[in-house]
Image (tube, rainbow, N blue to C red):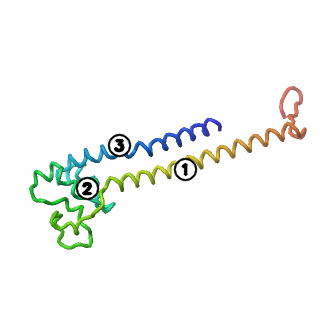
Amino acid sequence: MGQCGITSSKTVLVFLNLIFWVEDEVNQSIQKVYDEYNGTNTDAPSRAIDYVQRQLHCCGITNYSDWKNTRWFKESRNNSVPLSCCKPNVNNCTGSLSRPGDLYPEGCEALVVKKLKEIMMYVIWAALTFAAIQMLGMLCACVVLCRRRRDPAYELLITGGTYA
């Protein structure tokens, strides 16, 4: 039981460390994925970015203007961002930067970090709950052992060299 409690404590510390580490790592990873975006839904980076932008209602890393620095934007030469940046209630959205009101104004990086932190907090709370249950179990075991020493009714009965 004690080993499980120690392991739970270590797990909590690891996840607390991850919360602070996640922002830097997400920034590097998201920039790499945006650089690999090619506008087709056949490769993983394109599908991932389109999915994140639609689900989190965001566009770009910090905002929609981040798309101007990507290879896809320079190669397409159409002065637009992916259609996944378009707000769902806007009809005939082409992703054009000349109509920024049609696009999500918030970037995805902050929202992704926020979601990851929420998930990690659930894991931390689960680990803390598990550790508390372990501690309660250890406390109950200590109480039983202490009572056993004081109460002769808990003594072992030995008859003929065998335990009854």
Neighbour tally class for label 2: few under 14, some 14-19, many 20 plus, Cα within 10 Å: many
Quadrant in the picture for residue 20 = top left
Quadrant in the picture for residue 32 = top left
Neighbour tally class for label 1: few under 14, some 14-19, many 20 plus, Cα within 10 Å: some
On the image, the x and y values in percent for residue 9 come to: 57, 40
Which SS class for mark 3? Answer: helix
Label 3 to label 1, Cα distance in Å?
24 Å
Which residue is identified by label 3?
A: 25
Label 1 to label 2, Cα distance in Å?
33 Å
From the image, state whether disc 3 or disc 1 is nearer to you.
3
Which SS class for mark 1? Answer: helix
Question: Is residue 102 or residue 164 the one in the foreground?
Answer: 102
Tell me the tag on residue 126.
Answer: 1
Q: Earlier in the sequence, mark 2 or mark 3?
A: 3
Label 2 to label 3, Cα distance in Å?
17 Å
Q: Is residue 143 left or right of residue 73?
A: right
In the figure, 146 relative to 83: above or below?
A: above
Q: Residue at x 21, y 57 (%)?
A: 65
